[in-house]
Each structure stands twice: as structure tokens, then as C-alpha cells.
Amino acid sequence: MVKVLFIAGGGRTGSTTLHNVLGQVDGLAAVGELRYISGRGVLNNQLCGCGVPFAECPFWREVMQQAFGGVDAAFAREMLAHTESFRIRNLPLVAFEPTRRRELDRLTGYRERLARLYAAIHAVSGCRVIVDSSKNPSYGYVLRHVDGVEPHVLHFVRDAPPVAHSWGRHKEFEPGVPMARKGPAAAALQWLARNATAELFLGERGTPRMRLRSEDLMQRPRDHVESIVRKGRRGRGRVALHRPARGAPRRTEPLRVRQQRPLPPRAGRAAPRRQLAAADASRRPAAGRSDHAAAAPTVRLHVRPPLAPAPRRHNRRAPWLR
């Protein structure tokens, strides 16, 4: 049985940082977002976490060879079509037994291929647990019905306002490959849909599940990472937080987390009313190295203490606003 730690939730939550940190734990293999391995990995040949294109990565070449005897564009397009055929809008159908059985029967071949993929990753990496940060609840539901896979769901949640702000910013998967951007309304709808369906459909049939807020992780990263590992292992030895991520289908360098003291408020500017956590991770690949154990950048966590709220002001011309 292949144990998989599935990170569920919405996009722009900081799950990449959590994924990279978990990839350093002894016995865990962080492999990125496996839901998109056919499109972003095989078809688009985007960079692996080791810094080389997906098709040139020795880890993924060995995995694909062991799982499928090698893959081509036609096979990848077929896998991608199966992946996109079951999305969040299909999840309400599984609430009823006839339609649930019909959907699972339709995805039988796809589930068998996923079983071979995860088994190959487990064999090649030699890990105890695979960390999959796909996040999409529909993919997580399919994963729960894959033979030979034991999923453990980690519902990772971030407050909606910073998620909407992040969706409006320009980001890139790699130089020249921009990520999608969303307006506030679209970001809010996706945040609501993904978190609601993760709560409703990923905890059935006794699937182990825990919830973690991104803001809590930024406050006490080591405590929460150790809690995740303990719940995933349950009596399998001590926790060691020192292993680099290996073979992720997107750029996910290993990280070193260092917590700093609270910073004083800036002079001449009003301090925020509540605590803010900001992570600054520089992505500098090690010069002359292409292996998976490249030098790790550092995540610095800055926590600003709350101050007294600003005095309330009233508009005399609008008494109904008082």
C-alpha cells in the first residue's frame, strides 16, 4: 500500500512552501502537483525541481519507464483528457450511489494508470510517504478510489483576502511561462468551491484528514510540520527535518525555514491592526549543480505585533454611517 499525503485546498495558499518543507523530511518524497504531470510535465516539458526540463530529469524518466514503459504525446493527451473530465462540477454527482458508480466506472482505466504511477514513484524514490500538492478536491476524490493507494488528506487553508490579492499578481512557473491570473470575484468563487468540496467529499469512508491554516504555519512552522509527520507515521521513529525535495514536476527547491523576532513598527506609518506574516523566499539555484540536493534558499518569517486600533472617525455629513 502506497501512502500519499494529499494537500487539498485552493491555489495561492502558500502550499508550495509547505510542500518544499515536507520534502526535506526523512522518508517523504515531495513530487509536486501530480494532477498536472501530463500537461505541464510531459507535453509542455516544464522545469523539474532539480532545474532541468521534465523530459531530461533522470528521476522522472525512470518513473515513467517503470510505470508505463515510457510515455509519448498521445498517451499524455489521453491522460490529460481523463484528468479534465472529472472536475469540481462533477463532485455533486458522487453524492448519489447510481451516478457515483457510473463516474467511477468511467474512470476505471484512469485510476489503474494512477495506481501504476504512484507505485513507480514509491519504488524509485524509496520513500515511505509521497507528498502530492495537487490541491484540487476532484483529483483527491479520484485518488481515494485508486487501488493500492492510501491517501491522507491535509486541508490547507489561507484567508480569502490575501488569496485574492495573490491571484491578481503576476507570477511565473518559470521564466517566460506566466501563471493564470484571476479577478477578486473569480478568486473568491474558487476559494469557496475548493474549500467547501474538500470538506464535504474528502473525509468520507474513514479517510484520515487534518486541517491547517497557512497563517498558523507561518507562526509556528516547526511545530506544525512535526505534527503532520507524526500523524502520518504514527510510531515509525523520530522526526528528522533534513531531506531535499526530489523530482517535483514544477520548480520546488528545498527550503530552510528560520523564524525571526518580531519587527518593530515602521516609523511614520500606521502599523497593521492584526498580526501579518510575510515570507520572503529567494530562488537562487546553486551554481554548477544540477542534482536534486542543490543549495536551499531561506524562508524568513516576519511577524508584526498588533497595536491599538486607530480612533474611529465619523462623517458629519452622513449621519447614517455613524
Image: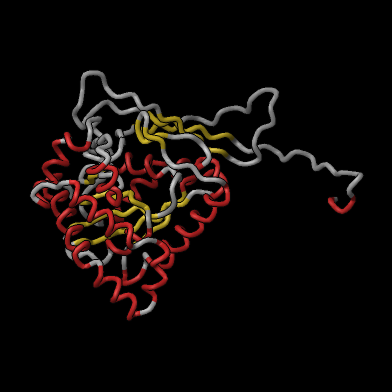
Judged left or right of residue 109, residue 92 is right
Depth order, front residue of 251/150: 251
- Work out which quarter of the rendered image holds the N terminus and state it: bottom left
Depth order, front residue of 224/158: 158
| Residue lying farthest to the bottom in this orientation | 98
Residue 42 position in % (x across, y down): 22, 43
Depth order, front residue of 218/292: 292
Whether residue 198 appears in this view of the structure is yes
Q: Quadrant of residue 14?
A: top left
| Residue lying farthest to the top in this orientation | 287
Judged left or right of residue 38, residue 225 is right
The figure's colour scheme reads secondary structure
Residue 142 position in % (x across, y down): 29, 63
Whether residue 220 appears in this view of the structure is no
How many marks overall? 0
Residue occupying the point 41% across, 39% down: 179
Residue occupying the point 25% across, 44% down: 31
Residue 35 position in % (x across, y down): 29, 52
Q: Quadrant of residue 15?
A: top left
Residue occupying the point 44% across, 42% down: 180
Residue occupying the point 19% across, 64% down: 109
- Say if 253 sits above or below 180 in the image: above
Residue 322 position in % (x across, y down): 85, 50
Depth order, front residue of 199/51: 51
Judged left or right of residue 126, residue 85 is right
- Say if 227 sits above or below 86 in the image: above
| Residue lying farthest to the front in this orientation | 74
Q: Quadrant of residue 222?
A: top left
- Say if 114 sits above or below 240 in the image: below
